[in-house]
Image (cartoon, helix red, strand yellow):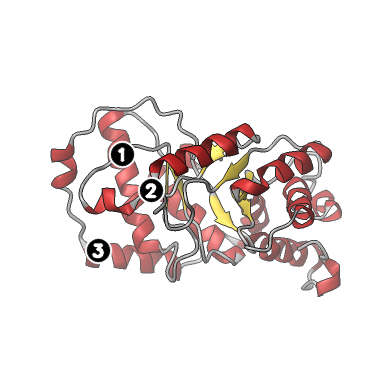
């Protein structure tokens, strides 16, 4: 994510003393997944809230200007207007939190968002996504070019050698994964990350954001993620400045669930053609 954090002196001795109670983490993860996170009468409201945390993403090798245009239109109009009207939410300006694209597609996204009158951020996965193994000079240049083209947030892929050798660095956000791994966002890993964010806040007063990415596809999952963040970090983290969900297909299921909430029936494919 973008780097606004001016930095805090890093106490590596504190980090080296951290231990994880793995069985307890797994129990907590099972608890989160097993229960219904939101009462039925509140689900539509929470699903709309979930929409506002989505970094609507396309990171395909065959991305073109036309599919970036469709993505940006969907970011501006994530839920069908008649469904929002039925919920009396049509005038609330609900959009996704951002769109996330490759550096070479940033110009397309900026242009498309401007065309639909939307000022949400454009995020880009610069720095040798997804492996992060390109030369530092190349990585920095990729960031510079993405920002020059209009990206206001950068999802940085760290060189994991630094972590494996204990060379820690700071960040405004921490992200579970690139979304391109075999296993991506999981609740046990998220619990450890969220508690690290909480401990860091207690120790320094600095709030670090959290972004789960990869494999979050269902509306039910999105509610579980919101519930987890709320319980571990509190309501103050439930805002796009501190919480994002990286997803490409999640929005489709959220819109289907809202359609069902409003109409009492499940949508046919042609009912939600932009999903």
Residue named by callout 1: 169
The residue carrying pointer 2 sits among few (fewer than 14), some (14 to 19) or many (20 or more) residues within 10 Å by Cα, namely some
Residue drawn 68% across and 56% down? 44
In this view of the protein, can residue 239 be seen by the observer?
A: no
Residue 91 percent location from the top left of the image:
80, 39
- In the image, 208 versus 39, the foreground residue is 208
Q: Which residue is mark 2?
A: 158
The residue at which mark 3 appears reads as 24
Q: Nearer the viewer, mark 2 or mark 3?
A: 2
Q: Secondary structure at mark 2?
A: loop
Along the line of sight, the residue nearer the viewer: 147 or 46:
147
Residue 57 falls in which quadrant of the image? bottom right
Q: Mark 2 to mark 1: distance in Å?
A: 9 Å
From the viewer's perspective, is 151 left or right of 12?
Answer: right
Residue that sits furthest to the top in the current view: 6
Q: Is residue 28 left or right of residue 125?
A: left
Q: Nearer the viewer, residue 25 or 4?
A: 4
At x 60%, y 58%, the residue is: 59
Cα separation, mark 1 vs mark 3, equals 28 Å
Figure check: 29 above or below 159: below
Res. 165 visible in picture: yes
**Residue at disc 1, secondary structure:** loop
Image height of 199 relative to 129, above or below: above
x, y percent for residue 253: 67, 66
Q: Earlier in the sequence, mark 1 or mark 3?
A: 3
Specify which label sits upstream in the sequence, 2 or 3.
Answer: 3
Which residue lies at the image location 81% right of the left edge and 65% below the top edge?
272
Is the residue under label 1 in contact with that under label 2 (CB below 8 Å)?
A: yes
Q: Is residue 195 left or right of residue 36?
A: left
């Amino acid at each position: 994510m973008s780097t606004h954090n001016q930095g805090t002196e890093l106490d590596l001795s504190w980090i080296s003393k951290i231990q994880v109670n793995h069985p307890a983490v797994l129990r907590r993860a099972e608890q989160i997944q097993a229960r219904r996170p939101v009462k039925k009468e509140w689900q539509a409201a929470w699903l709309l809230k979930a929409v506002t945390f989505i970094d609507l993403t396309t990171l395909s090798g065959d991305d073109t200007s036309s599919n970036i245009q469709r993505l940006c239109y969907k970011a501006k109009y994530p839920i069908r207007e008649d469904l929002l009207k039925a919920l009396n939410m049509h005038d609330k300006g609900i959009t996704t939190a951002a769109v996330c694209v490759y550096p070479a597609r940033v110009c397309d996204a900026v242009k498309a968002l401007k065309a639909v009158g939307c000022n949400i951020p454009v995020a880009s996965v610069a720095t040798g996504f997804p492996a992060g193994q390109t030369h530092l000079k190349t990585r920095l240049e990729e960031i510079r070019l993405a920002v020059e083209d209009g990206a206001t947030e950068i999802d940085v892929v760290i060189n994991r050698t630094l972590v494996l050798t204990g060379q820690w660095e700071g960040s405004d956000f921490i992200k579970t994964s690139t979304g391109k791994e075999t296993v991506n966002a999981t609740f046990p890993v998220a619990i450890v990350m969220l508690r690290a964010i909480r401990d860091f806040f207690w120790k320094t007063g600095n709030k670090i954001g959290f972004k789960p990415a990869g494999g979050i596809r269902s509306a039910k999952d999105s509610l579980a993620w919101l519930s987890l963040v709320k319980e571990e970090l509190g309501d103050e983290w439930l805002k796009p400045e501190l919480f994002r969900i990286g997803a490409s297909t999640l929005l489709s299921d959220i819109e289907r669930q809202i359609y069902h909430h409003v109409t009492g029936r499940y949508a046919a494919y042609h009912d939600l053609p932009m999903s």
